[in-house]
Amino acid sequence: MSMLTFNFCGVDAVDDLGLIVNSIKRPVTPEITENTQDVPGMVGKIFLGNSYGQKFFQIDITLLEASSEELIEKISQLTDLVMTFGDREYPMIFSDNSAYVYYGHFTSVTTPVRVGSSATCTLTFACSDPKGYGEYESRDITINPLTITPNGTADCYPIFTCIPKNDVKKIAVADEEGNYVFIGADVDPDTGDTPIDLEPLVLHDECNTLAYWTTVTTPTFPVENGVVKGTMGSYPSTIRPNDFGSKTPGKWHGPLSLRWLPGAYDDFRIRVRLINIQSYYRAEGKIELYLLNSNGERIGKFMLKDNRTNNKVVYAQVQLGTSGNSKDLYNSPGTIKAGKTVKLTIKVKNGTKTITSAGKKKTEQLWKTITLDEDMDTSSFTNFYGYLELQKIGNKYRVEILKQNYNGNPGWSKPIVIPWTDTNNKFSQNQLAGIALYCAKADITEDTVDPVVNYKNNELAACDIQVWNIINGGNDSTKPVVIARNGDEIKINCEDHTVYKNGAYFMEKLYIGSEFLTMKGGIQRTFAFEPGLDEADWYMEVRPTTQ
C-alpha cells in the first residue's frame, strides 16, 4: 500500500518536507446553505433551493523530528508552504485521489502538539471552487457535427481550436440546444459590404532565422547603460544570444540585431513574445526590443529586465521616445513576493606566500571565503514567457501584457491593459519603420572573482514578432472583416469565457448573443462547427471534473 501524501503547489509533503500524513478527511459535499422564505400566516416555509459553498479538507499530519531545533525548522518549512498572499488559489493533489487536482488555500493550522520526539497538527484546506479537475483530454475533430460524452461527473468546459486553411470572416461553434459562440460578421445583405481589412499584418517573424536581421556593433541610438558585444543566434522558434561578450564592469553587455519593416507606419500594432527566465537568483539579465523610425532613431522600447541584485524580481517596461525624452506607459515588477534570504559562500584567491620546505622555497596560493546574499524574492514577471503589445492610432496608445504557458494558453486570469492619450502630440508623429533586439547581462561578483564562479545566465529570447499597419483608424467593428487567415489559431476557451487569436485576447469580434458552452460528465453532447472541416482544422480539449 502506497504512503499517503499530498502535493501543494509542487511541494510534496513526504518527499520534500518529510512529513507523515496520517489521514485526509474529505467532505461528502461542499457547504450547504438552505434557502427558505417565511410567509405570514403559513405553516412552514417555502423552500427556495440549496446554495453550495466551499469544500473543506482536514489533513492530519505528524512532524517527525528528534530535537526541538529540528522541530522548529520543520514548522518553519510548513509555515512557508501554507502561507499564501493575494487572491490566487493553488493546486492541491491528494495521493489517494491523484487523478484530480483541487485549487484552494489553507484556512487554518492547529498548534503542533508534542508527542515524544514528534508533533502532530491538523491543516484545513479550502476550495472556493469545490470541483476536482482531471487531466485535459484532447481529440482531433474529424466529423461535423461531433457527438461526445465527457468523462467525470460534474460540469466541464470545452476548449475549441480552429486553424483556418484560407481567409475567414466568421468562426462559430453551436450545440444541439441552440447555444453558440460566434466570432466575426457575415456580408451585410442590405449594403452588400464585403470584408475589408484595414489592419493588415505587415510582418510576422517567427524567430526561426537571422536571415532578415543585421548584426549591429555600433547602433544609431544608445542602448541604455550598455555596450554592444557578443553574438546572437537563431534556433527553432527563438532568437537568443550565443554569448554576451567580454566582461564590462558597470555596464550591460550583449549582442544587438536589427530588422527593417516593409514600410514606415503612422499607426500600428506591434506584439512581441519574449522570454526572461531566471535559473540563478543572483544573475542579472535583460531583453529589450527597440522601436525605430526610418532614420534608425529610437521611438519606443519593450523590456524585461532583471536587475534587482541577488533575487529574481523582473520589471516589464513599455516606453515611448528615447532614454532622455520618454514616457513610460508601463514600468513595474507587478506584485513582488518576498522570500527568504540565504547565504552563499565562494572560495577565491587571496594572494600568495613563500614558504620553505625541505630547504627549498616555494610559492603557496592563499584563499579566502566570501559570503554572498541570495534573496528568494520573485515578482509577477519572474520566469516570464508571454507577449507585450503596443497599439498606436493617432495620439491614442494602448498597452497589453499577458504571461502565457508554453502551450500558448494564458498564465494570468486577464492581461494588463493600459490606455494612454498623448494630448500634447509629443510622440504621435513618429512612424514605426524598424526594430532592434538587444540581449544583455550585467556582471556580478561571481564574474569578477578569481577563479570565476560558473552559473547559468538568464535565458533571454524573442519567440515571435508581429506588426500590423492600421489604416484610417482600423477596422470598423460594425462591418465584416477577415478575422483569421491561413494558419492563424483561434481558440474558444469556454473555461475562462475568452477567445484567443495566436495566444492573445481576441474578444472584439465576439458576437453579442454568444454563450460559452458547457458539458457534464457522463452526458452526451453534440457540437457543429463553422467553417467546416474542408476549410479549417478543428481540435477540442476538455478537462473532466468531479464533485
Image: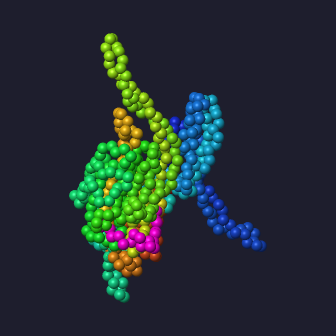
Tell me, yes or no, if residue 492 can be seen here: no
Residue at image point 38% right, 46% down: 250
120 shown above or below 186:
above
Q: Position of residue 344 (x, y in %)?
A: 45, 36
The residue sitting at 34% across, 82% down in the picture is 187
Q: Quadrant of residue 224?
A: bottom left
Q: Please identify the residue farthest to the right as the structure is shown.
A: 41
Furthest residue in direction left, as rendered: 211
The colour mode here is: rainbow
Direction from residue 16 to residue 232 in the image, left or right: left
- Quarter-of-image position of residue 191: bottom left
Q: Position of residue 511 (x, y in %)?
A: 43, 75
Give the camera-side residue of 201 and 432: 432
Q: Is residue 113 above or below residue 85?
A: above
Q: Which residues are magenta?
A: 415-434
Can the viewer see residue 53? yes
Above or below, 157 against 245 in this view is below
Q: Nearer the viewer, residue 409 or 419?
A: 419
Residue 118 position within the rendered picture, expressed as x and y whole percent measured from the top left: 60, 32
Q: Is residue 206 magenta?
A: no
Residue occupying image coordinates x 43% and y 64%? 327
Position of 387 with respect to 122 (left or right) is left
Which residue is at a point 35% across and 15% down the rendered structure image?
356
Q: Position of residue 280 (x, y in %)?
A: 41, 43
